[in-house]
Image (cartoon, grey):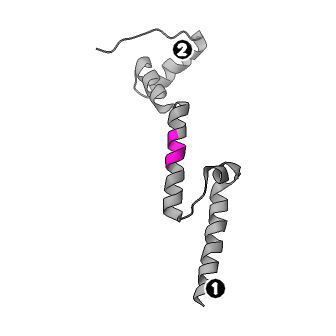
Amino acid sequence: MAQHTTIQVSKEARDHLAQVAKDRGLTLGQLVEQLAAEQLTAEQRAERLQADREIVRDTIGLDLSDEEFDRAPDVLGNIYKIAAEKVRAARGAAA
């Protein structure tokens, strides 16, 4: 059996969460469990970021360093530009 604990929040927060839980057909405890499960830890976010970067590298075929990802304010936009340049260069080489 799962152990239980008490979380202290304001009455307003408790009442709000109780209404949200009721609207969703859940108990307050179930809602809190669901909300907690949706929140990633810093370690989990870092793991997901690294996995996402690997997918981009593998899918697009670009060997971008983590530093390049970090410096890029719009990574997806920059990837599109780089990919377009590579396509244009490949077409030019094939002509």
Q: Is residue 53 visible?
A: yes
- Residue with the mark numbered 2: 14
Badge 2 marks a residue whose secondary structure is helix
- Estimate the x, y position of residue 10 in percent, counting from the top left: 60, 10
Q: Pick the quarter of the image with the C terminus.
A: bottom right
Q: CA distance from mark 2 to mark 1?
A: 64 Å
Magenta highlight on residue 94: no
Q: Main secondary structure of the magenta part?
A: helix
Q: Which mark is residue 8?
A: none
- Work out whether residue 8 or residue 95 is closer to the camera in this orientation and state it: 95
> From this viewpoint, which residue is outermost toward the bottom?
95
At label 2, counting other C-alpha atoms closer than 10 Å, the crowd grade (few under 14, some 14-19, many 20 or more) is some
Is 48 covered by the magenta stretch?
A: yes
How far across and how far down the image is residue 61, in percent?
A: 52, 65
Q: Is residue 4 found left or right of 57 in the rendered image?
A: left
User: Which residue is tagged 1?
Assistant: 92
| Sequence-first tag of 2 and 1 | 2
Of all residues, the one furthest to the left in this rendering is 1
Q: Residue 8 or 74: which is nearer the viewer?
A: 74
Label 1 neighbour load within 10 Å: few <14, some 14-19, many 20+: few
* 2 or 1: mark nearer the eye: 1
Q: Residue at x 46, y 22 (%)?
A: 32
Determine the residue positioned at 54% across, 9% down: 8
Q: What span is in magenta?
A: 47-51
- Residue 22 in view: no
Tag 2: amino acid: Arg
State the quadrant of the N terminus.
top left
Work out whether 59 lies above or below 52. Answer: below
